[in-house]
Amino acid sequence: MSVALHRVGVGMKSFNSKTVRPVSGAKTIGRIMLEGKPTATRAEEMGKWLQFQPFAGLPKAEDITGADWESKVKGRTGIIQFSRYWARGGESTANASGGHIDLWNGSRMTVSSVPGVISTFGRAFGLHELLPETDFGWSDLRNSKQILFWEIK
C-alpha cells in the first residue's frame, strides 16, 4: 500500500513514531525506508496513519466490520483494511494480530502473486478460508476484529 501511495506522490513523511503508536507487543513501528521514503510494514499501523487523513482527498474511514463487509463496498473503490483476522506463529485465532491493507476495485483486492490469485478465486467461489494459520493458505476476512474502508472515487 505504501508503494502505491509513493507512486502517486504521497511521500508518507508523517508516518513515524510521533504520529503512530506501535501495535501491541511491538517496541517500534513497522517502518522501513524505500528509495528514501517512509514505508509501512504493518497493516494495523498503516491504517492508524490513514485515519489521520494525511493527504488531501482522503475521506474519513468507514467502519464496515462484519460478515457482510463485502456487500458494503461492492461497486465502490478505495482502500480497505482488515485488522486482527489471521494468527501469527504462537497466536490463537482468538488473539490473532495479523492484518492486511489493500486497494479495493469494487469487487476484489489487488492480485499481486500466485497465492493471491488462488485466494482471490477461492473467496469468489465461497471458499472463505483454506488452511488458515499456515504459510500456504488464507484466513477468513470475515473474522476481522475491525474492517475499515476509505472510499476513493
Image (spheres, helix red, strand yellow):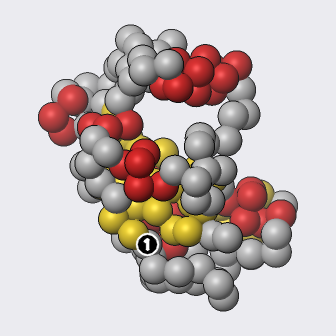
Residue 60 visible? The answer is yes
Classify residue 117 by image quadrant: top right
The quadrant of the picture occupied by the C terminus is: bottom right
Q: Residue furthest left?
A: 94
Residue 35: give x, y in percent of width and height: 84, 61
Residue 80: give x, y in percent of width and height: 51, 55
Residue at mark 1: 61
Give the residue drawn at x 48%, y 55%: 73
Residue 99: give x, y in percent of width and height: 41, 44
Above-or-below relation of 57 to 67: below
Give the residue drawn at x 83%, y 63%: 7
Classify residue 15 by image quadrant: bottom right
Classify residue 44 by image quadrant: bottom left
In this orientation, which residue lies closer to the viewer: 55 or 45?
55
Q: Mark 1, residues whose alpha carbon is within 10 Å: few (<14), some, or many (≥20)?
A: some
Q: Secondary structure at mark 1?
A: loop
Give the residue drawn at x 43%, y 72%: 61
In this orientation, which residue lies closer to the viewer: 116 or 27?
116
How many marks the image carries: the answer is 1
Residue 92: give x, y in percent of width and height: 19, 28
